[in-house]
Image: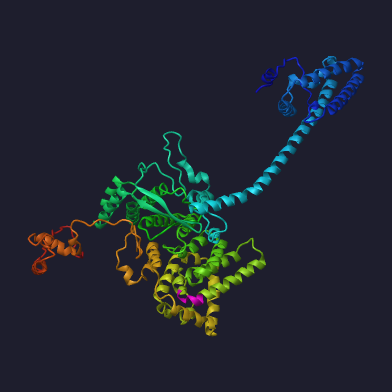
Amino acid sequence: MSTRALRRLKGKQRGQEALDLGDLSLGDSPEEQVEAEVGEEQLDTANAANAANAANVSPPSNSKSSSSRKTKKNKAQENFSNIYELICDAENESDRVSPDEDPGKNKASGTKKNNNKDVENQGQEHEEESTKSGDRVKKKKKKKKTKTTSEDGQLNGAAPENIDLLLENLELSNGVSLQSEDCGGSVRRSVLHVEHRNLNPETELKRYFGARAVLGDQRPRQRNRHFHRSTWITSPKESWPRFSRPGISMTLLESKNGVHYFTFEHNRDYQQAQFKFLDAVESMDPNNIVALLQLNPYHIDSLLQLSDVCRIQEDQEMARDLIERALYSFECAFHPLFSLTSGTSQLDYLRPENRAFYLALYKHMMFLEKRGCPRTALEYCKLILCLDPDSDPLCMLLLIDFLMLRSREYKPLLQLYQDWEEHRNLSQLPNFAFSCALCHFHLSQQDDVDPEESDKQRQQADQMLQSALIMFPGVLMPLLDLCTVQPDSTVSSHSFFGPKSQIGQPPALAELTALYVGRTYSLWKEAVVMLWLEESVKEVLRRVDAKDPLVEDCENKRKQRYQSAPRNIHRHVLLSEIKEATSTLPLEVTIQPVMGFDPLPPLDSVISYTRPERQHAGASNESTLSLFFRSLLPNFNLQGGLRQEDDMEVARVGQELNQEVNRLMVAMRDMLANIRFQEPPREDNPYRDEDEWD
């Protein structure tokens, strides 16, 4: 608002004088105001006398005029009833003084034009007085603010106790416990804490290449923008079909000890789509899945299965896009209390509705790791582990060390090993035994580490690597083979690291060893790391020849343990698709049909709804060959001839069918044996060289 408008609101005209800010005070008694006025009159007379002496002008007239104006000011101030209006005016005018209301010009109105310099000096002195008074008012306001903030601090200090009482009452009444610092999972959250910003791969790519290189032309356009729901895992794309709720919802089952247990649920429409999907999978035709996705573009299992088909066909972009679409459908169905970062929201893998969410997160994580975003992939790995840290259905502990080493999160890896060693025995896993040693070695090689700390880390790395080689000697030779390093003859010919160590491994240990070597061999290819490994191998051979008691102890442990791996490790090996590890899977796993949308389901699954029986359920036990011959012999209809009360008739029909099938098999064998293929006549080439051979 302009100064002219302010003057009109205050009832002033242009010729009126501005208020003297030095006379304003809050809470002063009338006596103090009188003393202040007298002091100011004395200052005014002194200033006028000095100006008169400098300009050879007599001062009495100026003193009288100034005293008369001062009395008018006091009367005008008494008419103001709103003190805060004066305070606001004082603050505004102390910062800037308008040229129309300059007090120096008003006081020097009776002087001559040739005394402009003295008048300006006088105005500057008066402005200094006004700024001092304005500062005095501001200091009083600051004192009041400090008082109020101190009172607020006392209130805030008492507030947490009341909040804790309210939260305890809510927990007792509703049974829903909120996240607190005292719950049992505080250690896990400190190590496996998930941050929303790290779930976005663009955050990591911007750190590597810059925002301009990452975004490019992907910045949203203002025209024709489609507003979608804000999500953390994935962001919807314009090329996706229009989102409509596919029939998935999330419900809260129970809350125990500060942990919320959720589950996904399917409505009737989604269940019907799921039944159609199972029929399409049994048909072994991907086109049926594509047709189902055209009707239900956000059906989860169809998106997962078709993503595997696209990945096999080396269409990585389409495969990744389908996984992101599935995750977006899941995130739109989240419960309001479900949190990705709190670490207190869990999903039971025993329920088939929850498994697709685990698998979608895992496949998305692997795409990010191959894309060159190990830090973002690590965040998703921690997220999957926090969904069920006790059972760990996808066995993420076999992968998290590799992602931490790739993203150079050395200290969090050591902290995880230290916190979980007591209740999970991480030292019995080859990946943690070798990765923690490698982690200490990288910490000793950092430039910003003190020499003493570097030596300490190096000693710790040497000790842990030697212990890992003694406990798992079958890791060395496959690791050197994949790193294309020719081992020394003393190492390859020694019985401890030779072929005997490979053959004598228990099956579960061979599976874990092949998995670790096939995944992390690229981390050991550095020249510095390979030299360090060579020194440790020589020291281990010296200890073996000296018959160190630790060698015999570790051998006994290998014989007693690692006889059979749990089902979640087999599931992890299947999902990893590492050739060295999949070749070590037991026979009972390889003979089972493995579906990409549900690999190795748990044996004790919690089924919420079942698939209805098909119309020709009796024919499901027959083989494909028997179904083919039954189509050639329509007279033998087993479905129509089955009667529970007549077992002899069923047996007779089955015997006749077997006889007919045998006759047809013999006839087809003879027919195939008598088939002769005639070669096409060869045309003589006149230009052919006689010495040319076929």
x and y percentages locating residue 576 in the rendered image: 40, 62
377 relative to 110, above or below: below
In the image, is 117 to the left or to the right of 203? right
Q: What is the x, y in percent for residue 326? A: 38, 50
Please name whichever residue, 165 or 473, is drawn nearer the observer in this view of the structure. 165
- Is the N terminus in the top left, top right, bottom left or bottom right quadrant? top right
Q: Is residue 187 magenta?
A: no
* Quarter-of-image position of residue 5: top right
Give percent across and percent down for residue 269: 30, 47
Q: Is residue 295 left or right of residue 539?
A: left
Q: Position of residue 287 (x, y in %)?
A: 26, 51
How is the protein colored in the picture? rainbow
Report the number of discs.
Answer: 0
Q: Is residue 116 above or below residue 426?
A: above
Name the one closer to the observer, 149 or 97: 149
What type of secondary structure mainly makes up the magenta span?
helix
User: Viewed as shown, does residue 322 lie left or right of 449?
Assistant: left
- Inspect this view and state whether residue 250 appears: yes
Residue found at x 43% / y 38%: 227
Which corner quadrant holds the C terminus?
Answer: bottom left
Q: Which residues are magenta?
A: 469-474
Task: Inspect this view and state whether residue 489 appears.
Answer: no
Please, is residue 109 above or below residue 367 in the view? above
Where on the picture, by quarter, is residue 504? bottom left
